[in-house]
Amino acid sequence: MAVYYPQHPSHPHNEVNMARTNFQYEKRQRELEKKRKAEEKARRKQEVKREDPEGGAAAPDDSTAQPEESAPQDA
């Protein structure tokens, strides 16, 4: 005698077409986004190098810097 299991996942009447996440696609999209951001960052870095050939951050303007006062010498 066959036993009827209506809740069994292999039963043909229990087929529900659920949308499944495509993890490989999502992972690839994240990787592509990371790569795009890294390329953008490298491009910005190159632009900064071209603008400031000495390298490093922009140096403070010497015209606005105040000279240091030396302590008066008692003779």
Image (spheres, rainbow, N blue to C red):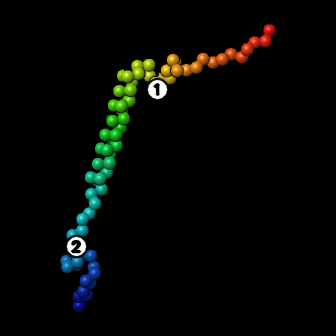
Residue 12's spot in the image, x, y percent? 19, 77
Furthest residue in direction bottom, as rendered? 1
Task: Tell me if residue 25 comes above or below residue 44 in the rendering.
Answer: below
Gap in Å between the C-alphas at discs 2 and 1? Answer: 60 Å
Q: What residue type is labelled 2?
A: Val
Q: Where is residue 31 in the image (x, y as percent from the top left)?
A: 32, 45
- Position in image of residue 21 (x %, y %): 28, 60
Identify the residue at horizontal 33%, vertical 35% (top origin). Answer: 39
Question: What secondary structure is marked by label 1?
Answer: loop
Q: How many marks?
A: 2
**Left or right placement of residue 50 versus residue 56 in this view:** left
Front residue (pair 53, 7) = 53
Is 42 in front, or is 26? 42
Q: Which residue is drawn at 24% across and 76% down?
A: 10
Above or below — where is 30 with respect to 54?
below
Q: Write down the residue under mark 1.
A: 57
